[in-house]
Amino acid sequence: MKANESIPKYNAKVREYTNYAARQVKDVCKTIGPRPAGEENEIKAQERFAEELKKYSDSVAVEPFGLHPKAYLGWAPAFAVIMIAANVLFFFGFAVVSLALAVLSLFFIVTEFFLGSATLDPFFKKCESRNVVAVRKAKGEVKQRVILCGHADSSYEWRFKVSGGKNLISLFLVGVVVTLAAAAYCVARGGLLQAPENDFIVTVVKWVLLAWCVEFLITAFFINFKTPVEGANELTGAFAAMAAMKYLSDNEFCFENVEVCAVITGGADAGLRGAKALVKAHRKEWNGTETVFIGVDALHDFDAFALNAKADPKAAALLKQAAQNAGVELQTRAFAGDAAVIGKAGVSCATLAAGSAATAKLYGTKADNVESLSLKAIEGGVNILLETVFLCDEQGLTAQYHA
């Protein structure tokens, strides 16, 4: 049975649950406000979500975990200072010191920002965040588990983003690589503490890198840690998952062999730390039962519904069929989210989002507020999630979908 066949006047009912989700987003933004990872407002939001989910679930667990929320983007100001020192030292001929600083910077940036490791954690304050895990049990033996997951936190403001600042990070990395190459060249030529004489290329690069210090200085102020943003659209995934749980509860749907879970992670904007804690706590449980994880990101642009390009083939096929049943065209695009972490635990997973270039411009800015919400996009997300759950009950992930 499809979700749209589950009750009379299904479309009208889905709109009711869409309005529920939108009202909840607006109320959280009004009464709680911005929710930076590991801070008081994020914990308040998670406590609220847990109380709300208790109305629609058989069990709700609040799972605390530790994190260093500012480490993920905190490298920007720290290593901007280091790279300014590296370039100034290179200008005065201290190539070997400049090389060491550039190598150090590149190592920490790649491991922390791109690989999501915790290499910078010891240098930043430790806080506590939480994951909320709600479960609607199956009537009989659990043969399959469906997890619908959004996140609770909002990001800090990304300064300069609207006025072309999105390229600052790329220019920062280029600057590090150029410094690294130039310093390595000088060291190879024997200029450890003195630049090679009569080398026109080195002379030009010295001045270029000195000028590049301006870019490093600007990047140091790229993240405004004093101003977290409202992050209204970031909440749409969490409340779409909760709306799906409410629908199942209100209409008394309890599947024979399918367990349905709603998970609200913390620390997503701090390097997907909530997803990592979730894997650590539930890996054995998930591996014991066929599990499909659907991460839900911002639902902002109905015409830009997509799943992530690196989705597991089974989960991708399931989500595509669910979208088709919901009458939504689903594209494939490159983006990450909590599913990027969950997939490494061997769980079939995919991420659903409804975001265009305009949505990307909202992230990390004050424009990501309740006025920017799209009821149509939220409705599409709720509809797809319900169709996903009902598809799993109808056929099962393995029986119906394959690569």
Image (cartoon, grey):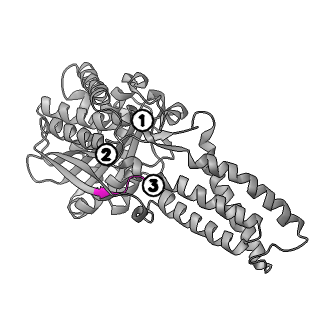
Disc assigned to residue 188: none
Front-most of residues 215 and 356: 215
In the image, taking residue 175 as reference, residue 319 lies left or right, namely left
Judge whether residue 69 is colored magenta.
yes
Cα gap from disc 1 to disc 2, whole angstroms: 13 Å
Location of residue 224 in the rendering, given as x and y in whole percent from the top left corner? 49, 42
**Where does the image place residue 167, in percent across and percent down from the top left?**
63, 44
Q: Quadrant of residue 373?
A: top left
**Disc 3 marks which amino acid?**
Tyr
Q: Going by the image, does 318 lie left or right of 50? A: right
Query: Under tag 1, what secondary structure?
Result: loop
Q: Nearer the viewer, residue 359 or 41?
A: 41
Q: Amino acid at mark 2?
A: Glu
SS assignment at label 3: helix
In magenta stretch: residue 293: no
Q: Which residue is mark 1?
A: 229
Residue 62 appears left or right of 317 = left
Image quarter hosting the N terminus: top left
For label 2, count other residues whose C-alpha is less than 10 Å away and answer few (under 14), some (14-19) or many (20+). some
> In this picture, which residue range is highlighted in magenta?
66-70
The residue at which mark 3 appears reads as: 72
Residue under pointer 2:
39
Rendered location of residue 369, percent (x, y): 41, 27
